[in-house]
Image (spheres, grey):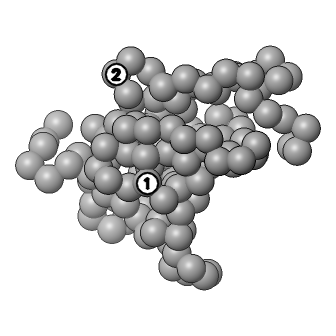
Amino acid sequence: MSDLWPTELRVSKDRRSLTITFNDGVGFAIPAETMRVLSPSAEVQGHGPGQKVTVPGKRLVGIASATPTGNYAVRIGFDDGHDTGIFTWAYLRELGEQGQELFAGYERELAEKGLTRDPPGVRR
């Protein structure tokens, strides 16, 4: 993975996804909600085994900022104020390739805990 780097990194006009294209020509549009709830930050992942947090209510979250971090990552800020996730190129590639499976696991966690993707006061 260290041989992969982005040739394009673009936030959609509606701020609901990040498009990334890698130097091998493979590209993905990764939903903001997926990045927010699967953020690599300690706030979401915890500081050790078994401390991962299931983050509810982020169906409508948007990307507020995308700031390069060295040559290896981008810090994504979300419009809910969360901005501590540093997304490496390798992790963005993983989210692009496995994001649907990882998100399905997140949805199972929500259901098991009686939580929802909808923000408080919003019903679908």
- Disc 1 target residue: 83
Residue at (56%, 79%) from the top-left corner?
47
- The quadrant holding residue 53 is bottom left
Which residue is situated farthest in the left direction here? 121
Kindly identify which numbered label has been placed on residue 117: none
* In the displayed structure image, the side of residue 33 where residue 56 appears, left or right: left
Toward the viewer: 97 or 27? 27
Toward the viewer: 59 or 105? 59
SS under mark 2: loop
Residue at (88%, 44%) from the top-left corner?
2
Q: Residues within 10 Å of mark 2 (few under 14, many from 20)?
A: few
* Residue 117 makes an appearance in the image: no
SS under mark 1: loop
Instruction: Inspect the image, locate mark 2, and give the three-letter code of the amino acid beneath it.
Output: Asp
* In the displayed structure image, the side of residue 55 where residue 9 appears, left or right: right
Kindly identify which numbered label has been placed on residue 14: 2
Horizontal and vertical percent for residue 78?
38, 45
- The quadrant holding residue 95 is top right
Q: Residues within 10 Å of mark 1 (few under 14, many from 20)?
A: some
Horizontal and vertical percent for residue 33?
41, 42
Instruction: Inspect the image, locate mark 1, and give the three-letter code of the amino acid beneath it.
Output: Asp
Horizontal and vertical percent for residue 45?
54, 68
* In the displayed structure image, the side of residue 78 where residue 21 appears, left or right: right
Q: Nearer the viewer, mark 1 or mark 2?
A: 1
Residue at (27%, 60%) from the top-left corner?
115
Which label's residue is closer to the chain start, 1 or 2?
2
